[in-house]
Image (cartoon, rainbow, N blue to C red):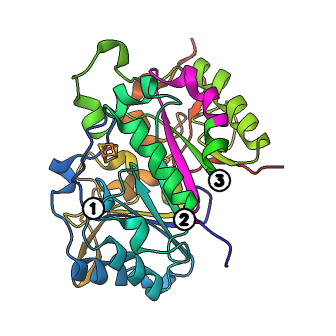
Amino acid sequence: MARKRTVAFSRNAVNLFFHLLTRCNLNCRHCYINPDQHGTRTLPLETVRRWLSAFQDRRRETNLVLLGGEPTLHRDLARIIRLAREMGFGSVTVDTNGYLFHDILERVTPAEVDYFSFSLDGPTPAINDPLRGEGAFDVCVAGIRRAVARGFSASLIYTVSSANIDHLDRMGPLLMDLGVERFFIQVIGLRGQSAVKQAGPPSYAPEQVSREQWIRVVPQVAESIADGGLTVVYPKVFLARGEAFACAGRVADNYFVFPNGRVYRCPLCEDYPLHSLVIRDQGLTPAPPINEADLFELSIPEGCVMNRLVQPGNIGYGPDGQPLYQIACCLLKEELQPE
Ligand code: SF4
Ligand code: SF4
């Protein structure tokens, strides 16, 4: 079987994040889906076919990620996966919360799906479920076991926040026991519903972690999990003064397609009508200025321009008024390979 590929957070990568719908059975505390900005449609199969065609030129380089909402709620997901394969996309990944609706594991094969990418935010139900919903841990873990038993490759996304950073180091043994191959560590952003949701126990209000916490915990845990045999991908988030900064909007090709036809190149822009492209049945067209593409060209000492605009609280300044560090692009990450 050909070597499995999936989303790559590196320079020159081409990733197509295709949101088939925004509906979901869960209501996670940090969910970034924003129906006001992203729409509420479930895209019909024919629309998906036409919209995917707009990205066919570089299809062999392109890592396609099918996501939602919860993409397994889409009745035609198996047909969409097959269609993407026929069209020749370089890899096909399905991001799921693990509920795996419509018997998706029985309707596709490991030759058709490179990775099922699961989301879990804690090593136990006590940590995960207050963030993702009662019972979500057990369902997700059972889903991973079923997928791996059927021969699928599994990856796992853990969104780090103040509510779960102290438990990140306990993920290693669980991931190895489950047979997960790739571990993606993400940082919580103040995007979408996560920015406004207030429900739930205050002790579990997931907030961004400080620079000190991030640097103390995340790189070390990533290394120890990679030592255990997994590929680990994590964002640096905080660059040291003088460390090279790059904006993926300039050095990579990422497309985030939403059911209302907006296409963003930067996930931090997704809460605003700043998309640089629009997709319709006729194809992909540029959105009118001013949009995110204008921001990619700016150079500021704080690093990421959008971070400076939407979450300036995570930047520290010295007595000279200069930032103490830069914020890295959230689309360019470190990748640790197992020995
Ligand atoms: S984070 Fe994912 S699983 Fe959770 S509510 Fe949002 S779309 Fe659903
Ligand atoms: S997150 Fe910042 S650095 Fe990355 S693409 Fe967006 S604007 Fe550019």
Q: Find the distance from the CA under tag 2 to the CA under tag 1.
A: 31 Å
Q: Which amino acid, by three-letter code, is at mark 3?
A: Glu
Q: How crowded is the residue under tag 3: few (<14 C-alpha within 10 Å), some, or many (20+)?
A: some
* Quarter residue 207 falls in: top left
Q: Nearer the viewer, mark 2 or mark 1?
A: 2
Identify the element where label 3 is drawn.
loop
At 51% from the left edge and 81% from the top edge, which residue is drawn?
58
- Residue hosting label 2: 150
Identify the element where label 2 is drawn.
loop
Of 202 and 54, the residue lying toward us: 202
Question: Is 312 placed left or right of 216 in the picture?
Answer: left
Q: Find the distance from the CA under tag 3 to the CA under tag 2.
A: 15 Å
Residue 215 image position (x, y, % from top left): 65, 25
Q: Which amino acid, by three-letter code, is at mark 1?
A: Phe
Quadrant containing the N terminus is bottom right
| Range shown magenta | 150-173
Residue 160 image position (x, y, % from top left): 50, 31
**Earlier residue among tags 2 and 1:** 2
Image-quarter location of ligand 1: top left
> Up-down: is 116 above or below 315?
below
Q: Nearer the viewer, mark 1 or mark 3?
A: 3
> Up-down: is 332 above or below 311?
below
Residue 125 falls inside the magenta stretch: no
- Residue hosting label 1: 258
Residue 166 falls inside the magenta stretch: yes
> Up-down: is 217 above or below 33?
above
At 67% from the left edge and 35% from the top edge, which residue is drawn?
173
Q: Nearer the viewer, mark 3 or mark 2?
A: 2
